[in-house]
Amino acid sequence: MTNQRIYRVAVLGGDGIGPEVTQAALDVVRAAGVSIDPTPYDLGAARYLRDGFVLDDATLDELRGYDAILLGAVGPAIGDTRIPGGVLERGLLLRMRFGLDLYINYRPFSGVAGSIAQGCEFAIVRENTEGPYAGEGGTLRRGTAHEIATQGSVNTRFGVERCVRYAFERAAQLARPKLTLVHKTNVLTFAGELWSRVVAEVAVQYPNVEVDYNHVDAACIYLVESPGRYGVIVTDNLFGDILSDLAGAVTGGIGYAASANLNPARTGPSLFEPVHGAAHDIAGTGQANPIAAVKSAVLMLEHLGEAEAAQRIARAVQDFSGDVTSLGTAGITNQLLERL
Ligand code: NAD
Ligand code: IPM
Ligand code: MN
């Protein structure tokens, strides 16, 4: 037996179904023979309601020391007025994405049997530190008849280019190398022109990659009507967020959609989480599909260089064909464990 590495992983189960699906993912990783030394962090809505803590500099710095971060989901239930919008999303999740320079949000999709996109494989490469998420804007004269709210979109040459380069690298590895820029260049002309120009410039270095462009509204049609056309979709932070939920829905359901918030430069840990949220509507019922969390853990193992274990879990997920609704979290997890 060779010396096995033990990975130090910060585990942020979070809220709602977050802890349930994260535990399932850790169980599956362990069954695949990878040694994880998990350090739980109690962060999210429940913690905030208890003592007002979201995330401070010291904790963020501490997170920099891990090999990876595994997150379930954070956020209050929709309609819970005790926590103003953004407190957790901006204060915790985005703070980690920005603070750890997780500039790529890589979201691979694989259409499960019976789904609209059955058999289709494609990925969304979402810019993860800029766009409307950057926080540019503000309010003036709040509460008056002359109130103003602006929310700008920040697109830097540096940020767009590193995202586009990553997307081309991914696209070049496909059996049918194809990259589609999705934007709204017909209206968002300033940002759209920058994205288009960068794609055209980088494309010169990837002559084997077919390059296409869709307006984001049309992409919503194509994802439903002809998802097989896509290889890698590269897009900005907000379009990528919205398209991910649509892509999840057409490939079998949001319970299957995984993501990797990557720092490709590896100046710190990357963060792995399902695309879905805390789903308070089904929390505690045992109905949550843990596959999105399991596949996020697969992305973590790939990033850590545990390709063989990652492949074994990915195969177990692919071979799984049970009825997710009747099996529930425990039933699905057990079937995956049996296959490992
Ligand atoms: P959501 O993804 O939590 O839920 C949307 C719908 O999908 C719900 O009907 C839910 O039951 C279903 N669903 C989600 N995950 C599922 C799973 N694994 N299995 C089966 N069904 C699943 O989105 P929402 O309701 O808009 O957001 C709830 C909270 O989660 C909000 O506070 C939001 O900000 C937060 N959120 C967090 C993250 C994250 O931490 N990365 C992502 C998205 C939303
Ligand atoms: C996601 C989520 C987050 C986002 C929220 C919770 C901040 O929807 O990871 O897709 O908008 O990026
Ligand atoms: Mn989202």
Image (cartoon, rainbow, N blue to C red):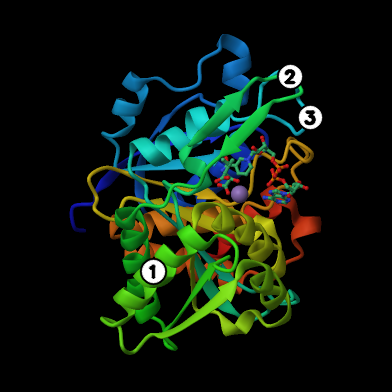
Residue type, mark 3 in image: Gly
Q: Which of 306/281 is in front?
A: 281
Residue corresponding to mark 1: 167
Looking at the image, is 132 positioned above or below residue 127?
Answer: above
Residue corresponding to mark 3: 79
Q: Position of residue 284 (x, y in %)?
A: 74, 35
Q: Is mark 3 within 8 Å of ligand 1?
A: no
| Residue 6 appearing in the image | yes
Q: Which of 263/84 is in front?
A: 84
Q: Position of residue 112 (x, y in %)?
A: 66, 73
Q: Position of residue 24 (x, y in %)?
A: 57, 46
**Element marked by disc 3:** loop
Pointer 1 local density, CA inside 10 Å: few below 14, some 14–19, many at least 20:
many
Pointer 3 local density, CA inside 10 Å: few below 14, some 14–19, many at least 20:
few
| Mark 3 or mark 2, earlier in chain | 3
Residue 312: quadrant of the picture: bottom left
Looking at the image, is 210 positioned above or below residue 50?
Answer: below
Residue type, mark 2 in image: Thr
